[in-house]
Image: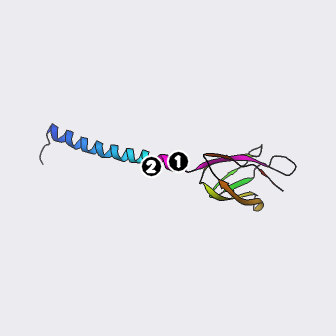
Amino acid sequence: MRLLSFTEIQSRWRRRWRAVSVILALTMLFEGPVLAQSSTVFGTITYHDGRPAVQILVVIGQNFRYTDGGGRYKIDGVPPGRQHMVCKRGSAILWQGDVDIAGPQMRLNQRLP
């Protein structure tokens, strides 16, 4: 086994750091557009008489959240485009329909029948 000189060690570390720098730069370059391609969807679910719909499961595409005590929900990471939205309590579907998701944030309020 041969001992490496200080210059050889420096050279190897420089090459490794260059590779790490390139990988980090590429990760940062591609991470921005991926994050920009999803939306945060929020809103309020109410019953037909205006009361907030509490603990309703709101599903948009593959993402979901339950409404809070005021009927409010917030779902991060929703892909843009046409998505199917479902509001349900237990196994009962209270409302469903297609919604168009656009922009980084979108308000979708829904009144249940």
Give coordinates of residue 74: x percent, y percent. Answer: 67, 46
* Magenta residues, start to end: 30-55
Q: Is residue 74 visible?
A: no
CB atoms of marks 2 and 1 within 8 Å: no
Corner quadrant of residue 91: bottom right
Cα separation, mark 2 vs mark 1, equals 9 Å
Give coordinates of residue 79: x percent, y percent. Answer: 59, 54
Q: Is residue 98 above or below residue 29?
A: below
In this rendered view, identify the residue nearer to me: 99 or 17.
Answer: 99
Residue bearing mark 2: 30
Seen as rendered, the residue at the extreme top is 6
Q: Is residue 25 visible?
A: yes
Give coordinates of residue 15: x percent, y percent. Answer: 25, 44
Asked if residue 2 lies in the magenta stretch, the reply is: no
In this picture, residue 108 sits left or right of residue 33: right
Residue drawn at (53%, 48%) of the image:
35
Task: Say which element carries label 2.
Answer: helix
Seen as rendered, the residue at the extreme right is 49
Q: Quadrant of the C terminus?
A: bottom right
Corner quadrant of residue 9: top left
At label 1, counting other C-alpha atoms closer than 10 Å, the crowd grade (few under 14, some 14-19, many 20 or more) is few
| The label number, if any, that marks residue 27 in the structure image | none
In this rendered view, identify the residue nearer to me: 72 or 9.
Answer: 72
In this picture, residue 73 sits left or right of residue 9: right
In this rendered view, identify the residue nearer to me: 69 or 86.
Answer: 86
| Residue type marked 2 | Phe
| Residue type marked 1 | Leu
Residue bearing mark 1: 35
Residue drawn at (75%, 49%) of the image:
109
